[in-house]
Image (cartoon, rainbow, N blue to C red):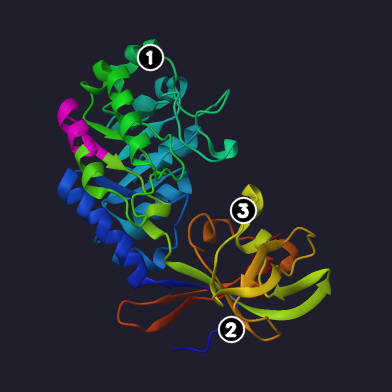
Amino acid sequence: MPQLRTPYYLIDEVRLKKNLEIIRLIREQSGAKSVLALKCFSTWCVFDLMRQYMDGTTSSSLYEARLGREKFGKEVHAYSVAYSTEEVEAVAGFADKVIFNSISQLNRFHERVSGLKVGLRVNPGISYSHFDLADPARSCSRLGVCSEQELDTVSDLISGVMFHFNCENDDIENIAAAIDQIGIKYASLLKKMEWVSLGGGIYFTKDGYPLERFCRVLKNFSERYGVQVYLEPGEAAITCSTELVTTVLDVVHNEVAIAIVDASVEAHMLDHLIYRTSPRISSPSSGTNQIIIAGRSCLAGDLFGNYELETALKIGDEVRIADAAGYTMVKKNWFNGLAMPSIAVRRLDGSVELVRSFDYKDYIGNLS
């Protein structure tokens, strides 16, 4: 194992493969294909493994679509909330499916992508999300077409539709009812389509998830409307596979003990700051020693959270922060000019490979 200096992200391919095998099982039992949501995870050093189990990638921008083609291969689904003319022309060169967010974008650009499978995002007016910030069906949402009448007028221009309406949905009763509701509401449209994406945000890799029932729901939907079903897993593909490994630099006391580690919530796990959540600590284990674990940036609220651990942390101790893959590495930034965590992978054979490290040249190159 190479000498790894903290902080670093450590991706474990054995843990990653556990999720991927579930994705393969779903395809075998339901026929549903899965494309990786690059907005959640685009660390391509593990794409050689992931492409063995997944059917391609789905993107939210031109650059993500290009990354999918160059680094993952297989199917490339290109979606954007809004394309410019130049972006549509570029994305048409390497996408298999182009999905527009609005009818105005579809009408404006469909001739430029006429040789590809063209789709449209539909907002069904239902959703599952713990946070309004991430709710695609929130009031005045700009995400997808709401009018059934307008959809009918352009149905001949598209071969598929995308419904992305979930965020961390682990409730099989909810997703089954929602898929049934979508089928009933859009039956006439669906019967004209070749493919339907049910989007991401479905937590089907959670321990104990009723996979057999989920597969039946997907297969019944596919057969009822004669469509190829796609899923767009992001978190579900990589959950529990990655840690952010840090070292305690200092312990200060202000009412409670506060351990300051050599990483930052704002710079290296930004979603927790945005959603005001706390990550789980994978090491040390839980116990009775109360402590706040904090980041090293100058932001007062740069806190991983309040924890009870088996040991009282001291300078030099290692702290491993769990679930550091989804919406994490794709959002890392250079706030405060803090050292960027390296990226390492524990391969299937147990060997650890340092695949990327960052230095001052990377920092200065990110600026101008």
Closer mark to the observer between disc 1 and disc 3 = 3
Instruction: Say which amino acid is labelled 3.
Output: Thr
Q: Which residues are magenta?
A: 217-229
Instruction: Say which amino acid is labelled 1.
Output: Glu
Residue reaching furthest to the front: 288
Residue reaching furthest to the right: 254
Q: Position of residue 117 (x, y in %)?
A: 27, 33
Judged left or right of residue 70, residue 335 is right
Q: Is 286 or 218 nearer to us in this picture?
A: 286
Tag of residue 148? 1
Q: Which of the two discs, 1 and 3, labels the residue nearer the N terminus?
A: 1
The residue that appears at 34% across and 25% down in the rendered structure is 111
Is the Cβ of the residue at disc 1 closer than 8 Å to that at disc 2? no
Instruction: Say which amino acid is labelled 2.
Output: Arg
**Element at badge 1?**
helix
**Element at badge 2?**
loop
Which SS does the magenta portion mostly show? helix
Is the Cβ of the residue at disc 1 closer than 8 Å to that at disc 3? no
Question: In the rendered structure, does residue 228 fall within the stretch colored magenta?
Answer: yes
Q: Position of residue 285 (x, y in %)?
A: 54, 75
Tag of residue 277? 3
Residue 221, above or below 299: above
Residue 49, above or below 198: below
Q: Which residue is mark 2?
A: 5
Q: Position of residue 306 (x, y in %)?
A: 68, 64
